Image: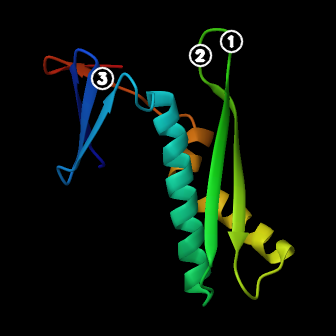
Amino acid sequence: MSKVSAVLYEDRIEYRDSEDQELVIDSEGASPMELLLMAVAGCSGLTLESLLERDGYTPDKVKLTVRGIISDKAPRRYTEINVDYDIVCEGLDTNTLEKYLKITERVCPVVQSLNATVHLTYTLNQQTYQ
């Protein structure tokens, strides 16, 4: 199971992952919704790069820009997410790259989590609620 912790201090949040690496976000940094888009970019990019390298390709450039549209009405959530890829990889044409992108979408765990219904529970003072 993956695990992160978050501690809130006035105008900042300190996150720690299971390896005890820290990420601090203050009132001027990325919002939690932007962090979700960053997770999509990171997972998609690393997944794509791994697939390409597995098949013997070394991309010269992989740049992702992720945009999300947030609903105006409650619940405020992303209703659309677009991943714009800018890829330079010798020996690959657009059709082949498109096939890799479709595989990436299918196997990226972050994207699949967004496409699925996720069962959420929470624990308050050692009591679990659903």
* Numbered disc 1: secondary structure: loop
Determine whether label 1 and label 2 are within 8 Å by CB: yes
Give the residue type at disc 1. Asp
Left or right: residue 16 versus residue 61 is left
Residues 53 and 1: in front is 53
User: Would you name the residue on which mark 2 appears?
Assistant: 76
Residue 96 seen in this snapshot = yes
Q: CA distance from mark 3 to mark 1?
A: 26 Å
Indicate the quadrant containing the C terminus: top left, top right, bottom left or bottom right: top left
User: Would you name the residue on which mark 1 appears?
Assistant: 72
Determine whether label 2 and label 3 are within 8 Å by CB: no
Q: Residues within 10 Å of mark 3 (few under 14, many from 20)?
A: few
Q: Please state the horizontal and vertical placement of residue 83, each as a whole percent of the image.
A: 69, 49
Q: Earlier in the sequence, mark 3 or mark 1?
A: 1
Q: Residue at x 17, y 49 (%)?
A: 20
Q: Is residue 125 above or below residue 99?
A: above
User: Would you name the residue on which mark 3 appears?
Assistant: 122
Quadrant in the picture for residue 86: bottom right
